[in-house]
Amino acid sequence: MLRSLSVKYSPLLTRIRSRGRAFSTQPASSLGCLPTTDSPVVSKLAFFNSVTGDDSKIPSYRVLDGFGIPIEGAEVPEACISEQFARRLYENMQLLPTLDNILYNVQRQGKISFYMTSYGEEAAVIGSAAALADDDEVLAQYREVGVLLWRGFTLDHVMAQCFGNHEDGGKGRQMPVHFGSKQHHFHQISSPLATQIPQAAGVGYALKRDPERRSKNVACVFFGEGAASEGDFHAGMLLASTLPSPTLFLARNNGFAISTPSSQQFYGDSLSARGPGYGVDTVRVDGNDVLAVMSAVKEGRRRCLQGGRGVLVEIMTYRVGHHSTSDDSYAYRGRQEVENRKKIDNPITRFRLFMESRGWWNETEEEELKSRLKQDVLASFKRAETLKKPDLAELFSDVYAEEPWNIREQREELAGLVEKYGQVWEPWRNELKIFKDEGKKLLD
């Protein structure tokens, strides 16, 4: 009965009967699509586990090989790589390890409480910074101080934040390397992992709604592959792809989420394989090649603005340093592995060789640059450690528009203790001297 009804009410369907079975002769291309999707209908059962279509790995884009020579078929972005611009790139890349060397040792001396380095990721950070507009909104993770330095954030500002002195824009309330600067469109870093990812998608949507910044600026969010294991990654990608919002997702895949290697974080083809699942343009790039990073991020930004939708760039690099000053990475990876990486694929060395091949750099300039940068960082450090902490009264300001009762009670209690012990008990007297106002404003 069902078969006869099928024939009766499908006049366009021709059936061929063979041994009591019916087969449709309708071409596969005319079988249509299933509801709620544009997926074509096929007759062959086939599973897939690759976005490339042939089970191969997603390729990584590169411009320069390990010797600083453009690889066959690569296009050096000549339009933006002048000698002057290349020098700026290189000097900023060299500044990062200089800053890291000094502040890492300063932390070990107990003068600051915490620090995180960018060793091995200099090209990933500076190449990205160079590709963005200076007024694009950046939401960073921990290792992107190079973006701020590229935009004009001074060494004095870096030191002020790490020491928490009265010149710190955050008024000493954040732990070191948690930078932020409204002037430089760099949103305040927060410690919880991946929270900046959905926030960035929201920032991108706000930019899209602003007539003065629509089609002009993007929200750019940096995060590591470890952060991409958090649910916030998926929330941010979903928002930016479906709402949508012009958000540029820059994933620094440096191989480790603290002590967890990337091989234990995901089974698929790393993070790039996730992009097409959210319907966003995606590319994987050699993160130790500053020219490749800059080109990929620049094109990603263009696509963000053009489509008003998220774009994912996976930057493949290697974390040479320990996760932070609280970590000893040799407990979970071999020392020789790290040393080999530093020698075989150093992003700074690679770009230096490129510059030397063009006659833009030499050994004399190299020594002069390193000496100058070290002097600049040391001078800023010595100045910062002499500056006092913010006014003690600032401990209770800014968070609320109107001071709530519980904060008022705490402020009044501290004021009472300062008045009682501040001048008569030596421990309090000495401690108050580290504050700019020595606690006096709290008593006003």
Image: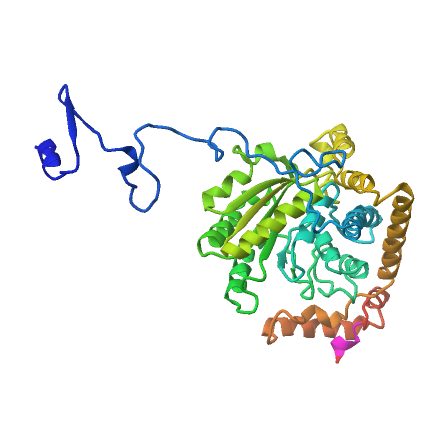
* Colouring scheme, one of rainbow, by chain, secondary structure, one colour: rainbow
Q: Which residues are magenta?
A: 439-443
Instruction: Tell whether 102 sits left or right of 13.
Output: right
Q: From where the camera sits, is residue 194 visible? A: no
Of residues 4 and 70, the one drawn nearer to the viewer in this rendering: 70
Q: Using the rendered view, name the quadrant where residue 136 is placed.
A: bottom right
Q: From where the camera sits, is residue 440 visible? A: yes
Of residues 94 and 29, the one drawn nearer to the viewer in this rendering: 29
User: Residue farthest to the bottom?
Assistant: 444
Q: Position of residue 66 (x, y in %)?
A: 74, 34
Of residues 264 and 417, the one drawn nearer to the viewer in this rendering: 264
Q: Position of residue 1 (x, y in %)?
A: 7, 32
Query: So how many labels did they put on this image?
Result: 0
Instruction: Tell whether 31 sits left or right of 228.
Output: left
Name the residue at 54% across, 49% down: 311
Q: Using the rendered view, name the quadrant where residue 15 is placed.
A: top left
Q: Using the rendered view, name the quadrant where residue 256 is placed.
A: top right
258 part of magenta stretch: no
Q: Position of residue 314 (x, y in %)?
A: 59, 42
Name the residue at 63% across, 69% down: 399
Q: Main secondary structure of the magenta part?
A: helix
User: Residue farthest to the top?
Assistant: 19
Name the residue at 77% across, 58% down: 158
Asked if 40 appears above or below 92 in the picture, the reply is above
Q: Position of residue 126 (x, y in %)?
A: 71, 49
Instruction: Tell whether 278 sits left or right of 15.
Output: right
In what quadrant of the picture does the C terminus appear? Answer: bottom right
440 part of magenta stretch: yes
Of residues 132 and 241, the one drawn nearer to the viewer in this rendering: 132
